[in-house]
Image (cartoon, helix red, strand yellow):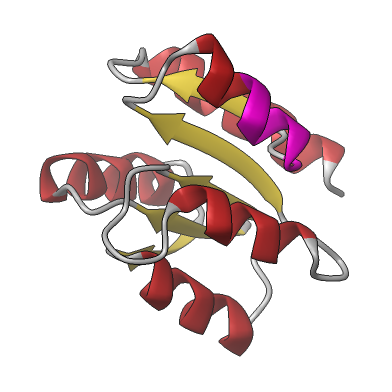
Amino acid sequence: MAEVLIVDDEESILVPLEFLFRKAGHRVELARTGEEALSRLAERPYALVVLDLMLPGVDGFQVLEALKARTPAPRVLVLTARGREADRAKALALGADAFLAKPFGVQDLMAEARRLLEEGR
């Protein structure tokens, strides 16, 4: 069981993701803004952060930079509608461990999450 933080401003994404990760046995917390994500990250370490890039206020790229400056840094799976090659390249250059564009397959998402959590042990 891992601590997972899901960061997305869309309730239609947050609720199903929370269900999927809880069903897989993980402890899940949610953040709806970049500021809320940074606040939660200051409170506790997470094994995995599922991160949208398009957030109000502090965007996902800024959250990613802050995450990867932490020691130890959590694994980060970017899950975003910004699927352009330039967005993917920037997220990976900033330290994202995986990148999935919306719409995504649930099996693909959970397989990537399992891989990242296993690598992060």
From this viewpoint, is residue 111 visible? no
Q: Position of residue 13 (x, y in %)?
A: 21, 40
Q: Is 94 within the magenta?
A: yes
Q: Answer above or below: position of 77 versus 34.
A: above
Q: Principal SS element in the magenta part?
A: helix
Is 111 placed left or right of 35 in the picture? right
Please tell me in which quadrant of the rendered image residue 37 appears: bottom left
Judge left or right: residue 84 versus residue 112. Answer: left
> Residue visible at 58% across and 76% down?
41
Q: Residue at x 58, y 88 (%)?
A: 43
In the rendered image, the residue lying farthest to the front is 86
Q: Position of residue 16 (x, y in %)?
A: 22, 40
Q: Nearer the viewer, residue 41 or 116?
A: 41
Q: Determine whether 41 is above or below 17 in the image.
A: below
Q: Is residue 99 depicted above or below 62 in this figure?
A: above
Relative vertical location of residue 114 with respect to residue 44 in this rendering, above or below: above
Q: Is residue 10 left or right of residue 78?
A: left
Q: Residue furthest left?
A: 12
Where, quadrant-wise, is the N terminus in this rendering? bottom right
Q: Is residue 71 magenta?
A: no
Q: Residue at x 68, y 38 (%)?
A: 96
How many marks the image carries: the answer is 0
Write down the region rendered in magenta: 89-95
In the image, what residue occupies the spot 37% across and 44% down? 23
